[in-house]
Amino acid sequence: MITTGLYWFTQDLRLHDNAALQEAARRCDRLLCVYCIDPAWFEAGEFGCVRLGRHRWRFLKETLRDLEQTLAAHGQRLILRFQSPRQALDELIAHDDVNMVVRSQSADWYLNDDWAVLQRRWPDVEFAERVTHTLFAQDDLPFALAELPGTFTQFRKRVEPLAIKAPLATPKALPPPIDMSGLSQPDLPGAIDDPDSLFQGGERAARTHLGAYFSGPAASRYKETRNALEGWKNSSKFSAWLANGSLSVREVIAHLRRFEQEVESNESTYWIYFELLWREFYQWYAHAHGVRLFALRGLKAEPPAPDHDRERFASWCRGETDLPIVDACMHELNATGYMTNRGRQLVASALINELNQDWRWGAAYFEKQLVDYDVASNWGNWQYLGGVGADPRGLRRFDLAKQTAQYDPEGTFIARWLAG
């Protein structure tokens, strides 16, 4: 019997270290590679924001074009469908007599809901998923998912001793594509030019950046520079490629370990690993708590009581709060689709504590704007700062004057982004 497979690309837009794609290549005789561009991403959602703003859309389009070229070099084709996954995959399974569907495991509750619906619709089709987005598989963890430690520190102490598997190589060959000669690819809406962009999308750009970062001294001083508000090399900048899966987190670890062996191992190189464990924690946090990741009350018994003032929220989005460090950071975000981790903490603290607004509105605006948006890290961090997530101490409030004096003592960052 010929196995006709459908590979659903989601947050794994690469060929290297992709166990799910290798599973499909091993078990399928012919393969349909699909990515779904959901029209709902471009519609205003519950919190008044579209889910995919221009910066992230530009980065995604670059990534998809890179993936198209890489697949073509392996004799494959990327099929783009401008439909919801439920609609697109349902039609393709029916039309092409697909008997196996493969994807990467995801921490995204909405994608998992789509996956579950499709499994119910097609009980005779085999559905398989493999781990590609995390350092560890669920079976590797020294606790059940229902017993996920309640804080990062507890999580880190439990998983830090675990061995991390070496990344898988890029497959040498893929099964041939299904004949889709009559299928037209959708036009991707929106301009791709973005002169203020800091990141180029795609697996090749990701791996080029990874090699360049560890070929210099930046990793040796990462802990000292990571909180700076400006400077390309002050932080690793892996986050955008990790978010859409065009870079493997295990590939990052492999480069880090090589750097530590061949160049230097110090507190800064450890801190890169430390922060990748933060990312890991939030992936499993999202798996464990599901749709509660988006709830106002988060993990708490009682929800906060924000003002829900739309104009005050809009002033925060525009960078017009009269809080200079906050406004400068928001101007940077709106112009580039990026903001440093320190900046994110400051603007989130201001929205929640100074302006008394719903933390979910801020999380939704970040989802729209951030090139490196990751559902688990974004919503988990906003819950953390909003006092409804993985922090027993409650709200995290930053002294903005003190933070400005520490991270912008000469006022150069504020002057740059508030000029004119």
Image: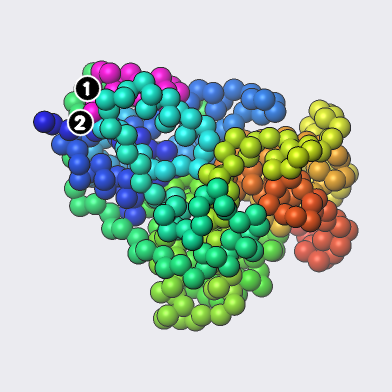
Q: Mark 1 to mark 2: distance in Å?
A: 7 Å
Residue 268 at x, y percent in the picture: 59, 74
Q: Which residues are magenta?
A: 83-99
Q: Residue at x 52, y 28 (%)?
A: 190
Q: Label 1, secondary structure: give it.
A: loop
> For the N terminus, which image quadrant?
top left
Name the residue type under label 1: Asp
Residue sitting nearer the eye, 326 or 393: 393
Q: Label 2, secondary structure: give it.
A: strand
Q: Residue at x 32, y 45 (%)?
A: 20
Q: Magenta stretch: dominant SS?
A: helix
Tell me: 156 left or right of 397.
left
Total numbered badges shown on the rendered structure: 2
Pointer 1 with pointer 2, Cβ within 8 A = yes
Label of residue 97 in the image: 1
Label of residue 36 in the image: none
Q: Residue at x 31, y 24 (%)?
A: 123
| Mark found first going from the N terminus, 1 or 2 | 2
Q: How many neighbours does mark 1 have within 10 angstroms: few (below 14), some (14-19), or many (20 or more)?
A: few
The residue singled out by tag 2 in the image is 4
Q: Is residue 85 magenta?
A: yes
Name the residue type under label 2: Thr
Residue 346 at x, y percent in the picture: 77, 52
